[in-house]
Image (cartoon, rainbow, N blue to C red):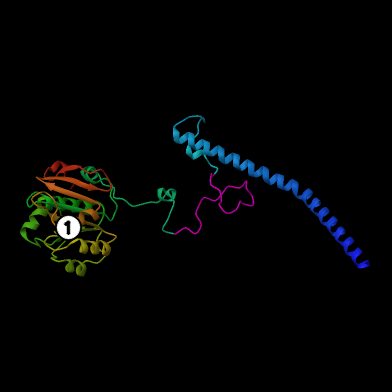
Amino acid sequence: LIYGVAGVCSGILLETLTEDFRKDFKKQRLPELKAYKNRLQEQLTLIESNINKQRLLTSGQTGFSGLSLTSLKTPILTKADTLPDTPESPLELIPPDISEKIISSQELMNMDYQALNFQGPWQHLFGFPSVNFHCVVHGMSGEGKSTFAIQFANYLAENFGIALYVSGEEGFSKTFKDKFLNNNARSPRLFVADLRTYQDIVSEVEDDQFNFIFIDSLDNMKIDADLMKKLRSRYKDSALVTISQSTKDGKMRGSYEIVHDSDMAVKVENGIARTTKNRFKEKGMEVDVFDPIKKIA
């Protein structure tokens, strides 16, 4: 009986102590919980305000004077799993563990690229291309495509670097020499080569010898789209200008994939060079190949 009474008393005492503990705990935690609730409410109000601002911006309304998208500094995203320890601190917008192959648009805008500062007719035609561009030139026989290519090679050699003109069609023939004489292409930085095949090029031309490589022509040297990709990979730091023949309907002979993979494409017809593709400027620009006023010595 004594043990029974003692047990009942102990139970009553334990329950009383537990209840008192809970009351004291609530009293101590209540102000902290209220403060945390207020911070959450403030954050929710700010989020709702930003959402409303964005809705007004996208709908074209002007309910907020001087407001722009760039002025919305507070993020409207929240963590899905748990709230931050300090709700008042800004949330991180950069994804965690991002790949090095992924950059922000702001980083892209801050990147620097080397471009060729073309002037005169060449700027009119091409704009400011990258230093390792690929330009496709095509036309019917006798229309002026080789003349245009020689003028272009001489301009690049005189102003931007060392150029190589590969003569895969005429070699070191008199007709080839006459084209250079007629265009006053005699720069000490312009070289010519009598190479007749793709294998000749890769065997004789090192990958870091020339800034510009002209290949005349892809048809005679039997260079298709696959071999062209290999050339661009081997001479990745050089600009390539390839000359091709045109079919009777005016299209470039061979695979159109070469044009698709190029940066610029020029069709030469009746002495007029016209861009049909250009990643550095709008296409459709024209120059007169045989007009001496528009030539750049």
Question: Does the magenta stretch mainly form a helix, a strand or a loop?
Answer: loop
Q: Quadrant of residue 213?
A: bottom left
Work out which residue is located at the far right of the displayed protein and give it. Answer: 2
Quadrant where the N terminus sits is bottom right
Q: Amino acid at mark 1?
A: Ser
**Residue 223's spot in the image, x, y percent?**
16, 63
Tell me if residue 180 is in the magenta stretch: no
Residue 245 visible in the current orientation = yes
**Residue 6's spot in the image, x, y percent?**
91, 64
**Residue 228's spot in the image, x, y percent?**
21, 61
Tell me if residue 82 is in the magenta stretch: yes
Q: Quadrant of residue 232?
A: bottom left
* Nearest to the observer: residue 68 or residue 167: 68
* In-image side of 41 versus 132 (left or right): right
Residue 183 visible in the current orientation = no
Residue that mark 1 sits on: 255
Mark 1 is surrounded, within 10 Å at the Cα level, by few (under 14), some (14 to 19) or many (20 or more) other residues, namely: few
Q: Quadrant of residue 48?
A: top right
Work out which residue is located at the far front of the displayed protein and give it. Answer: 1
Residue at 15% x, 48% y: name it.
267
* In-image side of 47 versus 237 (left or right): right
**Residue 111's spot in the image, x, y percent?**
40, 51
* Nearest to the observer: residue 112 or residue 66: 66
- The magenta stretch is 75-99
- Label 1 secondary element: loop
Residue at 65% x, 44% y: name it.
39
Above or below: residue 56 compared with residue 99: above
